Image (tube, rainbow, N blue to C red):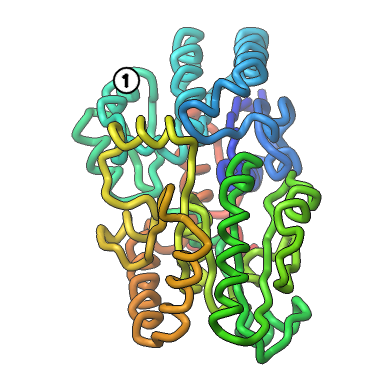
């Protein structure tokens, strides 16, 4: 009988990593069935079930605005869990929802694998002990997470970071500019305001104001790329950039090309900061949430930086502008400092190279392939796809 996996994700980054994991699972075991909840990419890869596009949310206060659809999705997934026989439940990020669901899965006798760990190293560290009671195996993507979970008695495996195989662009800056129809001699900027509507509303205004002020300070026209997250229509971007006298072009399905074409980027804190680092583009990181969420976060968060590149290196190589500091004025000044200082750009790029070395989980296989093999090993499936050293990417 074909094995069946219940997989759950609800974030744009989780959708990306989940789709790669589904492809790897199906390559190793083509008969496997994957049901559950995910976004457009996961459903295209083969998942059937609930569309998670409308469930992504950031912030402690902000979650209450979506409490009804989130609760309804949870109930639907619990019904699916009880109705069908699953060999394993694979949870991807989305911690508050997924850790609660892990308890429900364990009550039904279903094995639980967690891929893309909750950021217990950043805040609410005591969650690791609850994870030890409800998760059969953690598949972690940062090397320091493996030590943390092992100390808490969790069965854990470091698989490397999935973005190492995803955030790649083989073009030169000149080739990328030509592909996107950009002028070769203009200063080029990418702005990535986030993948959720709430983030975009908070971040895009100061980002484009920063671009406008940068243009004024440079005394020459610049061009701006605005890579759009899947599921976000052009309307919100056009509304928030209306009246800004800067050449802004919305980009679809070419984020890495846009970053490669850019001299610098302004990026909302999150997975996109790591993607930008892996492409090698100098950047400024910003982040804004509601005042209440920020105050609560200040009490709970236990790391000094918000940007993944700075967290991974335990060193602030990329400037961060948080909350009231995330203004157009400050963004423009940081960008100008980066553009005018080749040594600063070089130090940032050296840090990016260190990040790449830090995140490799071993030669031969990508993170999704290693994660897929670990999942299939847990549920006892015979693999009939590629073997180590024969990467899925090369088949």
Quadrant into which the N terminus falls = top right
Whether 250 is drawn above or below 30: the answer is below
Quadrant into which the C terminus falls = bottom right
Q: Residue furthest left?
A: 151
Residue 289 in percent (x, y) is at 48, 40
Mark yes or no: residue 348 visible: yes
**Residue 38 placement, left or right of 157:** right
> In the image, what residue occupies the spot 68% across and 61% down?
227
Q: Quadrant of residue 188?
A: bottom right
Figure disc tally? 1
Residue ID for mark 1: 130
**Residue 30 placement, left or right of 375:** right
Residue 387 in percent (x, y) is at 52, 54
Residue 76 in percent (x, y) is at 67, 14
Residue 57 in percent (x, y) is at 57, 33
> In the image, what residue occupies the spot 27% across and 35% down?
149
Badge 1: few (under 14), some or many (20 or more) residues near its Cα, within 10 Å? few
Whether 92 is drawn above or below 267: the answer is above
The answer to which of 381 and 208 lies nearer the viewer is 208
Mark yes or no: residue 377 visible: no
> In the image, what residue occupies the spot 48% across and 73% down?
335
**Residue 41 placement, left or right of 141:** right
Kindly state the secondary structure of the residue where label 1 is placed.
Answer: helix
**Residue 186 placement, left or right of 337:** right
The answer to which of 342 and 151 lies nearer the viewer is 342
């Amino acid at each position: 009988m074909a094995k069946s996996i219940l997989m759950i994700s609800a974030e744009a980054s989780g959708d990306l990593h989940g789709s790669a994991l589904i492809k790897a699972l199906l390559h190793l075991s083509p008969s496997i069935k994957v049901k559950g909840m995910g976004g457009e990419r996961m459903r295209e890869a083969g998942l059937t079930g609930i569309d998670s596009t409308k469930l992504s949310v950031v912030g402690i206060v902000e979650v209450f605005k979506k409490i009804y659809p989130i609760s309804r999705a949870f109930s639907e997934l619990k019904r699916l869990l009880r109705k069908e026989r699953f060999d394993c439940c694979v949870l991807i990020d989305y911690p508050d929802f997924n850790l609660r669901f892990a308890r429900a899965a364990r009550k039904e006798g279903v094995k639980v694998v967690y891929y893309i760990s909750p950021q217990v190293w950043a805040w609410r560290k005591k969650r690791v002990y609850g994870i030890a009671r409800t998760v059969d195996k953690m598949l972690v993507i940062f090397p320091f997470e493996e030590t943390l979970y092992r100390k808490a008695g969790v069965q854990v495996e470091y698989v490397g970071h999935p973005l190492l195989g995803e955030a790649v662009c083989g073009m030169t800056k000149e080739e990328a500019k030509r592909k996107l129809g950009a002028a070769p001699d203009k200063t080029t900027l990418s702005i990535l305001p986030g993948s959720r509507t709430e983030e975009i509303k908070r971040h895009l205004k100061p980002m484009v104001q920063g671009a406008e002020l940068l243009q004024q300070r440079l005394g020459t026209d610049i061009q701006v790329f605005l890579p759009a997250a899947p599921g976000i229509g052009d309307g919100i971007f056009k509304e928030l950039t209306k009246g800004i006298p800067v050449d802004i072009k919305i980009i679809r399905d070419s984020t890495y090309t846009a970053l490669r074409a850019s001299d610098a980027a302004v990026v909302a804190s999150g997975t996109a900061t790591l993607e930008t680092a892996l492409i090698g583009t100098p950047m400024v990181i910003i982040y804004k949430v509601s005042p209440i969420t920020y105050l609560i976060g200040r009490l709970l968060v236990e790391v000094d930086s918000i940007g993944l590149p700075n967290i991974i290196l335990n060193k602030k190589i990329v400037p961060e502008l948080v909350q009231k500091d995330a203004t157009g004025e400050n963004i423009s000044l940081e960008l100008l400092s980066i553009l005018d200082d080749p040594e600063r750009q070089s130090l940032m790029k050296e840090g990016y190279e260190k990040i790449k070395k830090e995140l490799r989980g071993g030669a031969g296989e990508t993170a999704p392939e290693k994660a897929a093999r670990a999942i299939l090993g847990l549920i006892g499936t015979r693999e009939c796809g590629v073997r180590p050293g024969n990467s899925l990417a090369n088949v």
